Image: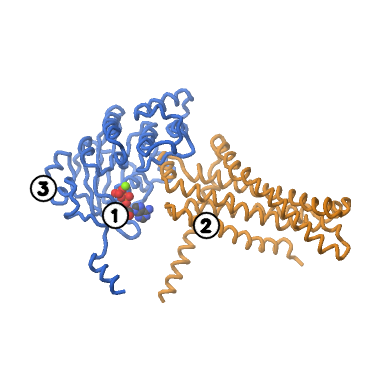
Chain colours: A orange, B blue
Amino acid sequence: MNQLAQLGRGALGKLAAFGRSGIILGHVLVAKPQPRTMLPLLLQQIYFVGVLSLIIIVVSGLFIGMVLGLQGYTILVDYGSEQAVGQMVALSLVRELAPVVTALLFAGRAGSALTAEIGLMKATEQLSSLEMIGVDPLRRIIAPRFWAGFYCLPVLAAIFSVVGVYGGALVGVDWLGIYEGSFWANMQHSVDFFDDVLNGLFKAVVFGFVVTWIAVFQGYDCIPTSEGISQATTRTVVLSSLAVLALDFVLTALMFGDF
Amino acid sequence: MKPFEDVIIDIQGLSFARSGRPIFRDVNIQIPRGKITAIMGPSGTGKTTLLKLIGGQLKPAKGSIVMDGQNIPRLGRRELFEIRERMGMLFQSGALFTDMSVYENVAFPLRVHTDLPEQMIRDIVLMKLNAVGLRGAKDLMPSELSGGMARRVALARAIALDPDLVMYDEPFTGQDPIAMGVLVNLIRRLNEALGHTSIIVSHDIQETLGIADYIYLIADGEVVAQGTPQELKEVDSAKVKQFMQGLPDGPVPFHFPAAEYVDELMQEARS
Ligand SMILES: Nc1ncnc2c1ncn2[C@@H]1O[C@H](COP(=O)(O)OP(=O)(O)O)[C@@H](O)[C@H]1O
Ligand SMILES: [Mg+2]
């Protein structure tokens, strides 16, 4: 009975946290835009969240593209259809790997940093201080960070795709000697703008929304001690990774599952 | 019971609990306008909590906190942010914005709430920094300041908008003797020159007795004594005497509420 009660309390706690995160999201989404003060803050956050994530995204994209090229070649060469490597690399990247891997890396690189930064602001009473000055921290601190993450992730995913395809071509064409013309032609022929590119982009938009939401909420809602901040940072990475992988399955089923 | 002619903050029947533990039980406090009122009491009694209740950052379970006719716990988000423009709060840790220089920290409230030209903002910021003796530190970042300096910058920021009410949370802790003297004078002088109302939360008895016009002594979730410094020195109550003379044992427990020490030790021994 006691365990049942504990289970119930745990579930209620989770539900309450979910409710609080909804309230925060609501405030961020409905806040009246104030371009004059918000734009510089947003640009600054886009720099921190997006531009500083570029290196890890580009390097990962390049290597994953190269690995795909190599694996694809070793499989397809047995069937004599190695010129399909381009198609395989591009489709796996655009549909799956770019949005998913970018979102996972983004959660680790930018999401955790957002949580830690906001949590530390809470612990050092900077958020309270803003409130007492008459500035809503949800608008001033949370909103620009949320929007920056939301805008940046799709762009990063697109960059990931482009760099990955380049990596695939590097291995497939330049190293393994697939005929360049058929490599690119196959790719262009098989990748559909609406079915593949837009669907992949849509995934990235959803992931950007969810990962950044989790990150800013965990920071804002953390227990304001060093221990609390470290727990919140861990939760950000774990929860966003799980959310991304689960959502990816759901979205893939919805987009490509109509057999 | 209204001992003052003009009250800026009127707290009636305030009750507040934290994680089930009552912090305030049916407390009445009036803050006289234009005066320096001290809230004293052992640490952990809820002095910081009281300031946050006045600032509307926490909501009481019961009771009213009225500032000039507006009941703060009942205000909507927007009205609350409006009324806070008339309050300045000096946090225990200073709470400077770590990504801004000292200058920008003090300028922040001005930039947010006024449309003053940059030249005027500059004049005001330098004036406020000069008042706390840190004009020379204007280009430093908060991480380059000592704890005491950070607190003084935070004070400059708290008074940047010339608020009607300034709340100081433990302004004296962590100040060296010189800065302490300066700060005591400063709070007094600012209060007189700017005509605002000050609430000082402190457990530094001597300094507080020196500048307060009126003192509330809280312990165990209640106001145990109130009066002018002179009146308080003469109160004939064990609780008050214990606190005013800084004795660890007496009616006010030094310990956080706990099971009997012996019982707890025995329990550990048994298990
Ligand atoms: N965020 C919080 N959550 C739960 N309890 C708290 C929190 N902050 C303070 N408390 C508790 O409230 C009581 C009053 O705290 P506080 O107002 O900071 O005391 P003071 O400022 O008088 O030293 C303390 O016993 C403390 O344990
Ligand atoms: Mg305190």
Quick one: SS at disc 1? strand
Q: Is residue A257 visible?
A: yes
- Residue labelled with disc 2: A234
Report crowding for label 2: few under 14, some 14 to 19, many 20 or more residues within 10 A (C-alpha). Answer: some
Q: Are marks 3 and 2 on the same chain?
A: no
| Residue type, label 1 | Ile
- Residue labelled with disc 1: B23
Outermost residue, bottom side: A1
| Residue type, label 3 | Asp
| Front label number (3 vs 2) | 2
Residue B197 rendering spot, x and y as whole percentages: 29, 35
Kindly indicate the quadrant of the structure image that contains residue B18: bottom left
Of all chains, the one bearing label 3 is B
Label 1, label 2: how far apart the Cα atoms are = 33 Å
Pick whichever of labels 3 and 1 is earlier in the sequence.
1
Task: Name the residue: 37% across, 39% down.
Answer: B147
Q: Could you tell whether A112 is left or right of B9 in the image?
A: right
Compared to residue A223, the image places residue A7 above or below, namely below
Report crowding for label 3: few under 14, some 14 to 19, many 20 or more residues within 10 A (C-alpha). Answer: few
Q: Are marks 3 and 1 on the same chain?
A: yes
Q: Could you tell whether B127 is left or right of B1 in the image?
A: right
Residue B161 rendering spot, x and y as whole percentages: 39, 32
Compared to residue A77, the image places residue B193 above or below, namely above
